[in-house]
Amino acid sequence: MMDVLIDTDAADRLVADMLPALPGERIALREAIGRVLRQIVRAETAQPPFDRVMMDGVALRWRDELSRRLRVAGAQMAGEVGQALRDDDDCIDVTTGAVLPEGCDCVIPVERFRRDGDVVALEEGYDPARGQFIHRRGADCAEGAVVLEGGVRIGGPEMSMLASNGVATVEVARAPRIAIISTGDELVPVEATLRPGQIRRSNDLALAASLERGGFDRVSLHHVLDDRDAVRDSLDALLRAHDVLVLSGGVSMGQRDFVPDCLESLGVRCVLHGIAQRPGKPIWVGIGPESQAVFALPGNPVSSLVCMTRYVRPALLRASGLAVPVEYASIRGDTGKPLRLARFLPVRLESDPSGTLLAHARGWSNSGDFTALGGTHGIVELPPERSIAEGAPVRVFRW
Amino acid sequence: MMDVLIDTDAADRLVADMLPALPGERIALREAIGRVLRQIVRAETAQPPFDRVMMDGVALRWRDELSRRLRVAGAQMAGEVGQALRDDDDCIDVTTGAVLPEGCDCVIPVERFRRDGDVVALEEGYDPARGQFIHRRGADCAEGAVVLEGGVRIGGPEMSMLASNGVATVEVARAPRIAIISTGDELVPVEATLRPGQIRRSNDLALAASLERGGFDRVSLHHVLDDRDAVRDSLDALLRAHDVLVLSGGVSMGQRDFVPDCLESLGVRCVLHGIAQRPGKPIWVGIGPESQAVFALPGNPVSSLVCMTRYVRPALLRASGLAVPVEYASIRGDTGKPLRLARFLPVRLESDPSGTLLAHARGWSNSGDFTALGGTHGIVELPPERSIAEGAPVRVFRW
C-alpha cells in the first residue's frame, strides 16, 4: 500500500468526493455569527426605503432664485414622518437618515447657513443644486433584488445585510459534531508529572485549537489506550454521535496500529491510506456507514497539524458549503533538497508593500520537530522531485 | 473642527497612544484557544525528552558485520521503559515514539525484515546505518530553551507547544469587555414590522459580528433613544462596566447628535473627532476616566463597518499585545476619482498564482450603500488627491 501512495491533489479530490454536504438548520440571527449562510437574502424593501436625507441641515424646495432667508416651519428627525412643506420660502429641519419631508427636493447642510431663531440665512454665494444630499428611494437596490448569496461566513457585512432585511432567523450549515480521539498508552494529561517514556497529551488540544480557529467549535476530546477492544468500543460509540472523527496516532504499520482495522470492522470504508508527502504520509481517511468522515492522522504533533491544515479543515469548509480559497505566496529562504514526496515546510508570512505575499521558510530538522512551529503562520507545499528557486510561487495553507 | 481633519495614519497613532495594554489573566489551557498569549514558554524537557524511536520495527546494536538473523528478546512499545539489550544477536520490538531500549543504537523498520516467530530475518543486501531512525534526546530543543514568545493568538501550533511543555494554566490578555450601543429613535428590532421612516437595528449586530470574527467575543448590545438624559445615564452605567464602548450614530453635527457632549460630561476626553476619509469621516474617539476606550462611529452601516475595521479592531489587537499585520494588495478595476479625503472601497480579494494578492474594487454609489458589501472580503484605503493606477499597491483591511 505504501508503494502506491497518491499525491496531495488526488487526496484532496478523494476527500472532497467522499464528504456529503452538511445539512442546514434555521437559527436566531444573533447566534449566526461565524456560521455559513445557506440561503439567498433579498432586499426586503428598496434601498434606501425612502428618499433619505444625507446631511444634518434643512430641507427645502429648490428654485432658480432661491430665497436666501427661509423660515423653519417644522422639523423631521430620523425615524419621524408627517412633515410637508407648505410654502416655498419655508424649510424644514432635518437630520441625517431622516425621511425627506414631502414637497422638498434639496437639503442644505448645517455648515452652509447661519441660524437665528426660526430663520435660516444661507451662506453668501452658496449655490445649492436641486436634489442634493438626498439619497433616493431604490438608488442602491430594488425591492426583492438578491443582496447576498449563500456560501459565505457571516461576519460584519453579511450580518448588516441580514439584519437590515429583517432576516430574524437564518438558514445556516449545521456545525459538524467533531470528536478528536488521541490514542496511545504513552500519553498523559498536560498537568501530569512525566515519567520516563511518557509524553503529554497535546495533539487533541492542538487539533481542537486548529478546528476552533477555523470556525468549527463543536468539538469534544477523547483519549483511548492502545487496546484493540477499548479502541473499537470507543470508536463505535463516537461514530454514532458525531459527523466527523479525527484520530491522532495509530495509523502507521506497527503491530499496535490497529486503528484502520477497527474502523473497517465498524463499517468505515477506507478512502485513502497514505499520501506521498512529508510529514503526514501515514494519514488514513475513511467514510462511515452514516457518511461520517473519519480522519486518522499520524501521531506526531507536526504531522497531525499539517494533515489537519491541508486536508481536514478544507474538507469541512467544503462540506459546510464554503468555497475554499486557494492562496499562493512567493517563497523565501532555504527550502532544502527535493524529495520523491511533496514536502510541507513551516513559514512566516509577510505582505510585501508591492502586494506580494512572502513566505519565509523555517524548515525543521525532522517531522517531529514541533519547536520549529513557534512564530509561524502556516505551511507551504513544495512539489516532489523539484528544486524550488528563491521567489518561486508556492501554495500556502495558514494554520 | 471639520476644517482640521487629521489623516488616517495620524488617527491610527492617536488611537494607539491612547489605549493602555489590557491586563493579563491566568486561565486553564483548554479555555485559551484564540486568546492572546502573554508569557514566554520554555521547553520543559529536552525535545525529544529521550532517544526516540522513529519507525515501527526492531531496535538493535549496530555492528560492521551485523547478524542477518536476530532473536526478538523483548518489546518496548511507546510509553514503556525498562528493556535493555543483553546480547548483540538479539533485537527488541519497538514502535514509533517508543523510548530506545538501553544498549541499542539502530532501528530497522518493519518493511526491511521478515519475521518468523521470535526470529527476524533482515532483507537481503539491506545495509542499515548506525543511529538510523533514532531521534536523539535534545536534537530539536534543549531543556529551558524558549519555544514560544508572547504576543500571538493561541491556535494549533501554539497549543501544541503549550500542552507538550506542561503549561496547564496560561497567562493571556484579558478579553476586553465591549458594549455596543446603537442610538436613534428610528431604529427598530430585526423582527419588527417596519413603519415609514423606520430602519431595522442592524449596526449593533454587524459590529458584534465584526468583533467576534476578529477574536473579541465579550460583547453586549444596547440601544438608547435620542434623548439626552437617557443617553447620558446609559453611557454612565456602561462606562463603569466595560473596557470599550462602541457607539453607532449620533456623532455628526446635527442638533440631536449630542453623544460627544454627553461623553465629555462623563469625563471622556476627546482624542479625535473627524478623520479625512470617506466613508466614516465623523468618527469620534475618546478615552474615559478609567482609560476606557470610546469609539463613537457614524450611524450608517457602511461607515460604521469601515471605522470598525480600520481603527477599532486594530486598536483592540494592539491593546491585547498582538502585532497588527499590515497587508497590501495590487488594485484591479475602476477606483473612481480622487478626493481631498482618503477613500475606502470594498474589494474582493484573490490570491494570484504568482503570489500577488489582487484586490478587485467594487465601488459604491455612496457611503450608505451597504448592498455593495455582499461578497466582498474587505476594504482598500486609497490615499487622498491621487489617481490610483490599475495594479498600484494599496493597503487592505479584511472585514
Image (cartoon, coloured by chain):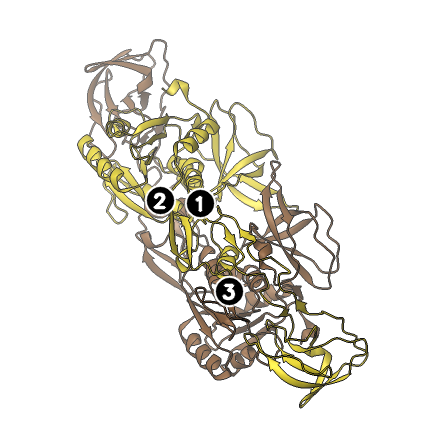
Chain colours: A brown, B yellow
State the residue in front, B88 or A325: B88
Q: CA distance from mark 2 to mark 1?
A: 29 Å
Please say if A154 is above or below A285: above
Q: Is residue B264 left or right of residue A209?
A: left
Q: Amino acid at mark 3?
A: Asn
Of circles 1 and 3, the one toward us is 3
Q: Chain of mark 3?
A: A
Rendered residue at 44%/45% (across/down) = B374
Q: Which residue in the protein does label 1 denote?
A: B374
User: Where does the image place residue A7, in percent across and percent down from the top left?
Assistant: 66, 65
Q: Which mark is residue A203?
A: 3
Q: Which mark is residue B176?
A: 2
Q: Quadrant of residue A17?
A: bottom right
* Residue A45 seen: no
In the image, what residue occupies the spot 56% across and 78% down? A260
Q: Residue furthest top?
A: A124
Label 2 secondary element? loop
- Mark 2 or mark 1: name the one nearer the start of the chain: 2
Q: Amino acid at mark 1?
A: Gly
Task: For the residues labelled 2 and 3, say whether their Cβ atoms are less than 8 Å apart.
Answer: no
Residue B213 visible:
yes
The residue sitting at the left extreme is B229
Q: Position of residue A307 (x, y in %)?
A: 57, 63
Residue A328 percent location from the top left of the image? 62, 49
Label 2, label 3: how many angstroms apart (C-alpha)? 29 Å
The answer to whether the residue labelled 2 contacts the one labelled 1, judged by CB atoms less than 8 Å apart, is no
Query: Against A171, is B232 above or below?
Result: above
| Amino acid under disc 2 | Pro
Looking at the image, do the residues carrying marks 1 and 3 touch, with CB atoms under 8 Å apart?
Answer: no
